Amino acid sequence: MRKVFLFVLANLLMAETVMADGFTLTSPQVKEGGRIANEQVFNGFGCQGSNVSPELQWKGAPAGTKSFAVTVYDPDAPTGSGWWHWVIFNIPASATTLAKDAGNPQTNLAPPGSIQSRTDFAKSGYGGPCPPTGDKPHRYQFTVYALKTDKLPLDENAPAAMVGFYLHQDSIGKAVLNVRYGR
């Protein structure tokens, strides 16, 4: 129990340090604390959005960053383990943005060399919010991770939980953008 407490405490302290150092994540389409627009909502499971990933911009990455990863996660999904909406990693350290609709693998808008792996929709690429009808609005966490490695040893078939394991092992900082969506 003590080890778990120390691990959690260390991660909280690291997150506060990252914010103090100015590592930030922003988007023209998605605002901190705001509501997801229909353009970013999933198209399926009863939702009729456009399923376009928003443009994401980050700055102030920690020294020693060798690559980035971005995830979108819903901790409120009624699954017992949340829902992974987007996982993209091996983004070059020179990148400071993901273009709008980069989450669609067919557009080839993601940075060269990056990998979009499987989400909880059982495919790669961005899958927007689509919480159950009548549920309270869900939280969606857009997170950019600064990593101490050039590449994660994974491919497009890696499940999100496996990618998450490596992200937590190799992260030297992260910035989060929190938004909500309900229907």
Image (cartoon, grey):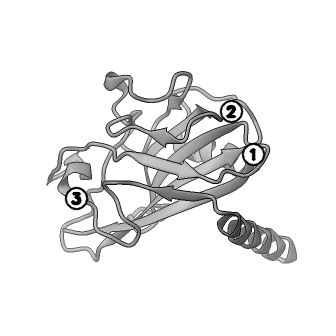
Instruction: Specify which label sits upstream in the sequence, 2 or 1.
Output: 2
Q: Are marks 2 and 3 in contact (CB under 8 Å)?
A: no
Structural distance between the alpha carbons of marks 2 and 1: 9 Å
Q: In this view, does 45 lie to the left or right of 166?
A: left
Given the image, on which type of amino acid does mark 1 rest? Asp
Secondary structure of the residue carrying tag 3 is loop
- Residue 117 is situated, as x and y percent measured from the top left of the image, at 49, 33
Structural distance between the alpha carbons of marks 3 and 1: 32 Å
Which residue: 71% across, 64% down?
A: 21
Identify the residue position indicated by label 2 in the image: 152
Identify the residue position indicated by label 3 in the image: 37
- Which one is nearer the viewer's eye here, 102 or 63? 63
The crowding category of the residue bearing disc 3, from other C-alpha atoms within 10 Å (few below 14, some 14 to 19, many at least 20), is some
Instruction: Specify which label sits upstream in the sequence, 2 or 3.
Output: 3
Secondary structure of the residue carrying tag 1 is helix
As displayed, is residue 114 above or below residue 15? Answer: above
As displayed, is residue 19 above or below residue 89? Answer: below
Which residue: 27% across, 42% down?
A: 52
Q: In this view, does 7 lie to the left or right of 82?
A: right
Q: In which quarter of the image is residue 34?
A: bottom left
Given the image, on which type of amino acid does mark 3 rest? Ala
- Residue that lies at the very extreme toward the right in this rendered image: 2
